[in-house]
């Protein structure tokens, strides 16, 4: 079955950096658009960064210039490099695999906590 396993979260001071990883298995990695979402306490889940199966990338305005999304097809892994972290980036970060063509689906990882202290 499909599994998405995130890692790399943790506690970091403001201005610091982290790299999140999402290891995918049980699916054809190249078929999927891959996304990072986050959810802060009391807030809705929001899209942070996305990379399509064709390599098109988009970012939320709040992270542009600070975060970089990257996918490695040889390792079936997606990454999120996060620089200049701010306390507002504190959230649980989720990996998402989305396939739009039939059969379409969405799969989610379990989430990894990122906490940025001021």
Image (cartoon, rainbow, N blue to C red):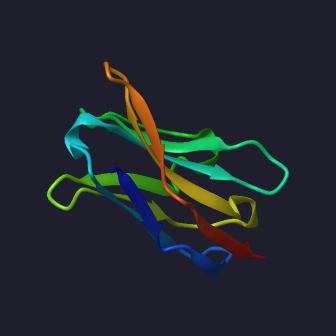
Q: Residue furthest right?
A: 42
Q: Nearer the viewer, residue 51 or 15?
A: 51
Q: Position of residue 16 (x, y in %)?
A: 58, 76
Q: Is residue 75 left or right of residue 97?
A: left
Q: Is residue 58 left or right of residue 12?
A: left
Task: Judge whether 5 appears above or below 57 on screen.
Answer: below
Q: Nearer the viewer, residue 102 or 22?
A: 102
Task: Judge whether 43 appears above or below 76 on screen.
Answer: above
In the figure, residue 100 lies in which quadrant?
top left
Q: Residue at 69% across / 65% down in the picture?
A: 86
Task: Give the total of numbered labels.
Answer: 0
Q: Residue at 68% across / 44% down in the picture?
A: 45
Q: Residue furthest top?
A: 102
Q: Is residue 63 left or right of residue 26?
A: right
Q: Position of residue 48 (x, y in %)?
A: 56, 46
Q: Nearer the viewer, residue 4 or 18?
A: 4
Q: Residue furthest front?
A: 1
Q: Nearer the viewer, residue 65 or 98?
A: 98
Task: Report the quarter where the C terminus lies.
Answer: bottom right
Q: Residue at 33% across / 50% down in the picture?
A: 1
Q: Position of residue 95 (x, y in %)?
A: 48, 52
Q: Position of residue 98 (x, y in %)?
A: 40, 35
In the figure, residue 19 lies in which quadrant?
bottom left
Task: Judge whether 31 appears above or below 35 on screen.
Answer: above
């Amino acid at each position: 079955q499909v599994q998405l396993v995130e890692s790399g979260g943790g506690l970091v001071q403001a201005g610091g950096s982290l790299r999140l990883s999402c290891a995918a298995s049980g699916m054809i990695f190249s078929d999927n658009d891959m996304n990072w979402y986050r959810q802060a306490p009391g807030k809705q889940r929001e899209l942070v960064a996305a990379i399509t199966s064709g390599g098109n990338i988009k970012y939320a305005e709040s992270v542009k210039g600070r975060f970089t999304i990257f996918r490695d097809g040889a390792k079936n892994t997606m990454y999120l490099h996060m620089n200049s972290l701010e306390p507002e980036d504190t959230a649980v970060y989720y990996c998402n695999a989305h396939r739009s063509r039939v059969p379409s689906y969405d799969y989610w990882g379990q989430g990894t906590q990122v906490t940025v202290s001021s």
